[in-house]
């Protein structure tokens, strides 16, 4: 379905940009009118904003800029320092890729981000959306930026009833048909602002929308129902056993997870694999990281990941000696906060300290 009336791919962007010039959000990473955009700041904000809200990101962004004001400074930093500063933003693979990308840009590109979408997509952690955002906002390239806000705006403007995620290709094609060649960065930010502040998921503010007269879903009275979404599959539950090992000095055993996979490279409380079937105590103790008399702690630790729910039981044990046996690192309990522990590991520590 096409937008109503005679609005076209020239008039609609013009209307949106006129609205944006009056109502653009003031954001810490957004260049002021007349100021050139800093590719480093654009990239940093876009990585942080993935699956996270503007309100949550703002203080992290400002702290990162204070500690690492340039891509070269971030590249030279210690990964653990970056992971520690990232705590609270979740999805730690983004932090690892952020650090690695800074190193690649510094070493292979002389500290300058490439401006081409295809070249940007070769950088660690930079996908199609982020590449388009950097190309458009930082370099003024004609690039179509499609995030959840943009999908919602386009689905309503064209009354696309195909459920997500099946509708993604169609929504991208329609969004691309409207992307102007001039002021591409402003347009990308404008359509994201429109989705974030006006064309919101519930009770869209259609009277304030510069595209209201052209919106097919508004005319049909279906705006709030779009974009349609396929029913979510029930998330499976995985089970594991965590080992809370404390030595004679009162230090707890931690170790680093493998670099690849979920929570890759993060510091953890040792545990079994996470599997679909619950573990018996006998199965778990056979895989304990150090010898100890293991005692089950009452209760469970529960944590929700994107694609599954996790249930952990805990075994606590006292370890006679604290020598470096390769099992991991021994951390005084009052210094746990110095390590970049993922949220699920913090839950384990709180549970163990409350029960042991």
Image (spheres, rainbow, N blue to C red):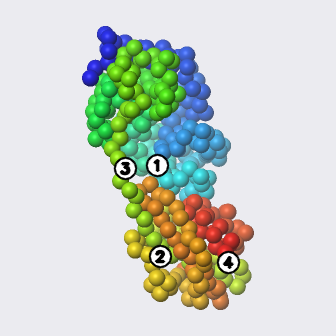
Q: Quadrant of residue 168?
A: top left
Q: Please count the marks in the image.
A: 4
Cα–Cα gap, marks 2 and 3: 29 Å
**Res. 101 mark:** 1
Instruction: Give the residue drawn at x 50%, y 23%.
Output: 205
Residue position marked by numbered label 3 in the rendering: 232
Q: How far apart are marks 1 and 2 (CA)?
A: 31 Å
Residue at (40% x, 58% y) in the render: 235
Disc 1 or disc 2, which is closer to the eye?
A: 2
Residue named by callout 2: 272
**C-alpha gap between disc 3 and disc 4:** 39 Å
Q: Are marks 4 and 1 in contact (CB under 8 Å)?
A: no
Question: In this view of the protein, can residue 149 be seen by the observer?
Answer: yes
Quick one: SS at disc 1? Answer: helix
Indicate the secondary structure of the residue bearing disc 3.
loop
Q: Relative to residue 277, is residue 223 depicted above or below?
A: above
Quarter occupied by the N terminus = top left
SS at circle 4: loop
Mark 2 or 3: in front is 3
């Amino acid at each position: 379905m096409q937008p109503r009336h005679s609005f076209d791919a020239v008039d609609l962007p013009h209307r949106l940009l006129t609205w944006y010039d009056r109502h653009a959000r003031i954001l810490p990473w957004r260049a002021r009118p007349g100021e050139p955009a800093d590719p480093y700041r654009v990239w940093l904000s876009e990585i942080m904003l993935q699956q996270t809200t503007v309100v949550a990101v703002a203080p992290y962004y400002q702290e990162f800029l204070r500690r690492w004001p340039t891509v070269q400074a971030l590249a030279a930093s210690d990964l653990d320092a970056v992971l520690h500063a990232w705590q609270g933003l979740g999805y730690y693979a983004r932090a690892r890729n952020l650090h690695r990308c800074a190193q690649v840009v510094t070493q292979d590109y002389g500290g300058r981000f490439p401006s081409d979408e295809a070249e940007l997509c070769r950088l660690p952690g930079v996908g199609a959306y982020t590449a388009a955002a950097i190309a458009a906002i930082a370099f003024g390239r004609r690039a179509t930026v499609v995030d959840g806000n943009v999908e919602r705006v386009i689905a309503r403007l064209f009354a696309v009833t195909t459920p997500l995620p099946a509708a993604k290709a169609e929504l991208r094609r329609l969004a691309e048909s409207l992307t102007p060649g001039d002021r591409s960065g402003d347009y990308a930010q404008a359509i994201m602002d429109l989705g974030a502040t006006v064309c919101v998921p519930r009770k869209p503010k259609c009277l304030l929308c510069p595209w209201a007269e052209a919106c097919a879903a508004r005319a049909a009275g279906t705006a709030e129902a779009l974009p349609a979404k396929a029913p979510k599959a029930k998330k499976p539950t995985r089970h594991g056993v965590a080992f809370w090992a404390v030595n004679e000095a009162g230090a707890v055993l931690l170790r680093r997870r493998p670099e690849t996979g979920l929570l890759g490279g993060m510091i953890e409380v040792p545990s079994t694999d996470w599997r679909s079937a619950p573990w018996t105590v006998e199965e778990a103790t056979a895989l304990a990281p150090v010898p100890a008399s293991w005692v089950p702690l009452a209760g469970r630790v529960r944590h929700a990941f994107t694609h599954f729910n996790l249930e952990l039981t805990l075994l606590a044990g006292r370890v006679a000696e604290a020598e470096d046996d390769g099992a991991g690192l021994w951390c005084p309990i009052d210094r746990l906060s110095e390590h970049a522990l993922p949220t699920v590991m913090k839950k384990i520590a709180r549970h163990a300290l409350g029960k042991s």
